[in-house]
């Protein structure tokens, strides 16, 4: 399907003239494209379909026609440090934007999923390629079957099934609107990113007071109650031994999303 560039651009509002927009009917991965074609300043790449969409931890991100797939690349100085909390802050701004257009019950699940009642609505992949910061966002439009390599406790929900009682704008307008929100975040100084997280995390925290298991990449697990995040975006878990701070891992909610224990 063809992307309507004008509709994306219009929704970018004041960024429309300063951001280089590239759209593709089909591409391997918008994140991959930006790593191979670094922008001089800021670039936005939107695809209708991705043949090899990338997810976190080397997973595949199913990208059939109908979903929203975009990446924003921003040139960095060689010494610039990408704040570790950036994926969470991008998650918050997406959750706010999705709520604005009528999606109900949207929350952010550490480390970087946008969820609705425990089901994944959007994923965020922040990467650095040489001197380019790349923020990739995938939003399900229709509820999807899980990909074979997704953890079995994960279900995916589409935006069409989250918006109740209001009219969902066209896909390109939603895409541009979400990209505009991410661009707002990328314009913040580091202190602004920290302040944004501090002020807003508790409103959007999907794991707050939930019984959570964190699976770490070395195969170990940690159990506890979600107790917010640190200023750097690490998860705080209240365990039997006190507060544990998790810098990475996959979070599973035990006993369902509605129960605390
Ligand atoms: C995840 O939850 O695992 C992150 C998924 C990120 C998917 C988006 S879709 C647009 C961009 N291009 C990619 O190849 N991946 C990101």
Image (cartoon, rainbow, N blue to C red):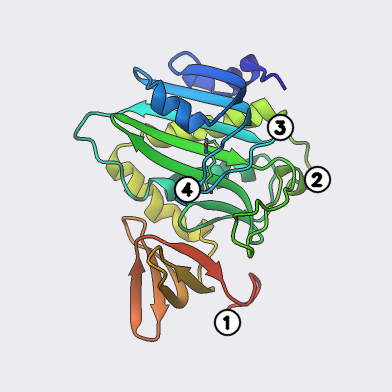
Answer above or below: position of 45 versus 217.
above
- Element marked by disc 3: loop
Which one is earlier in the sequence, the residue at label 2 or at label 4? 4
- Near mark 2 (Cα within 10 A), the count class, few <14, some 14-19 or many ≥20, is few
In the rendered image, residue 254, in percent from the top left (x then y), is placed at: 58, 75
| Of residues 92 and 38, the one drawn nearer to the viewer in this rendering | 38
Contact (CB < 8 A) between labels 1 and 2?
A: no
Decide which of 159, 26 is in the foreground and name it.
Answer: 26
Q: Which element carries disc 2, helix, strand or loop?
A: loop
Q: Residue 53: image x %, image y %?
A: 56, 37
**Discs 2/4, front:** 4
Spatial distance from mark 3 to mark 4, Cα to Cα? Answer: 22 Å
Please state which of the two labelled residues, at mark 3 or mark 4, is closer to the viewer: 4
Q: Position of residue 90 (x, y in %)?
A: 46, 43
Q: Residues within 10 Å of mark 1 (few under 14, many from 20)?
A: some
- Residue denoted by label 2: 165
Please give the residue where the numbered disc 3 appears in the rendered image.
65
Residue 15 visible in the picture = yes
Above or below residue 201? Residue 251 is below
Name the image quarter holding residue 261: bottom right
Along the polypeptide, which appears first: circle 4 or circle 1? 4
Q: Going 63% across and 14% down the picture, which residue do you hit?
A: 6
Residue at the disc numbered 4 = 58
- Dot 1 or dot 2, earlier in sequence: 2
Q: Which residue is mark 1?
A: 261
- The reply to whether callout 2 and callout 3 are in contact (CB within 8 Å) is no
């Amino acid at each position: 399907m063809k992307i309507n560039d004008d509709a994306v651009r219009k929704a970018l509002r004041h960024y429309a003239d300063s951001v280089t927009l590239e759209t593709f009917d089909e591409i391997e991965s918008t994140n991959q494209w930006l790593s191979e074609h670094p922008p001089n300043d800021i670039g936005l790449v939107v695809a209708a379909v991705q043949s090899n969409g990338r997810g976190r931890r080397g997973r595949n991100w199913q990208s059939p026609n109908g979903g929203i797939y975009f990446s924003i690349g921003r040139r960095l100085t060689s010494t610039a440090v990408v704040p570790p909390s950036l994926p969470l802050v991008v998650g918050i701004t997406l959750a706010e934007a999705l709520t604005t257009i009528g999606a109900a019950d949207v929350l952010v699940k550490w480390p970087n999923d946008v969820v609705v009642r425990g089901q994944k609505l959007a994923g965020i992949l922040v990467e650095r390629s040489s001197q380019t910061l790349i923020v990739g966002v995938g939003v399900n439009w229709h509820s999807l079957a899980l990909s074979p390599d997704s953890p079995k406790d994960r279900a995916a929900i589409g935006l069409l099934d989250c918006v109740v009682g209001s009219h969902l704008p066209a896909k390109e307008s939603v895409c541009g609107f979400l990209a505009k929100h991410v661009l707002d975040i990328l314009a913040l100084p580091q202190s602004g990113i920290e302040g944004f997280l501090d002020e807003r995390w508790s409103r959007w925290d999907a794991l707050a007071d939930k019984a959570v298991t964190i699976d770490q990449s070395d195969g170990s697990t940690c159990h506890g109650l979600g107790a917010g995040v640190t200023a750097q975006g690490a998860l705080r878990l209240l365990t039997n031994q006190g507060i544990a701070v998790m810098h990475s891992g996959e979070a599973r909610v035990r006993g369902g999303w509605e129960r605390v224990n």
